Image (cartoon, rainbow, N blue to C red):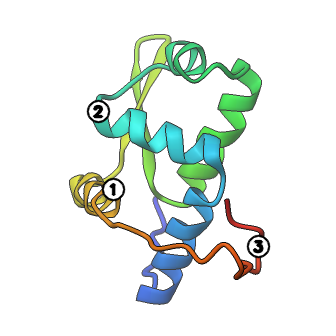
Amino acid sequence: MTVVDILTHGQVLARFGHALSDPTRARLLLALREAPGYPAELADLLGVSRQNLSNHLACLRGCGLVVSVPQGRRARYEIADSALSHALGDLLGVVLTVDPAAQCMDDCR
């Protein structure tokens, strides 16, 4: 039996924000937005170790943003919901005006 939690809007945004707060996870989400992928191929694409990629995939699964689809002995990863792909596209269209004198609390770059 699978247990599913219903999250509030704030919890959903917090999970999304946590996922995007790491540059490797953000790049991973953008890669999966383009097409589903296998861990070894995604690690090569992003230039990270397989262990590092595995940790990021586990985080993204825990946040509910990606799912693992078993395919024989392998697992393919994909964005959990097409609305997330759409949201990532919308975020890419945002133009930020950054004040170099102002500091982001989390040392944004």
Q: Provide the residue designation for mark 2.
A: 34
The amino acid type of the residue labelled 2 equals Glu
Q: Is residue 23 left or right of residue 38?
A: right
Residue drawn at (63%, 60%) of the image: 21
Q: Quadrant of residue 77?
A: top left
Q: Nearer the viewer, mark 1 or mark 2?
A: 1
Residue drawn at (33%, 56%) of the image: 92
Real-space Cα distance between discs 3 and 2? 29 Å
Q: Quadrant of residue 24?
A: top right
Q: Quadrant of residue 57?
A: top right
Q: Nearer the viewer, residue 70 or 45?
A: 45
- Which of pointers 3 and 2 lies earlier in the amino acid sequence? 2
Residue drawn at (48%, 77%) of the image: 13
Q: Provide the residue designation for mark 3.
A: 106
Real-space Cα distance between discs 1 and 2? 13 Å
In what element is the residue under mark 2?
A: helix
Q: Provide the residue designation for mark 1.
A: 92
Q: What percent of the width, then of the height, locates residue 68?
A: 45, 36
- Which of pointers 3 and 1 lies earlier in the amino acid sequence? 1
Up-down: is 46 above or below 6?
above
In what element is the residue under mark 1?
A: helix
The amino acid type of the residue labelled 3 equals Asp
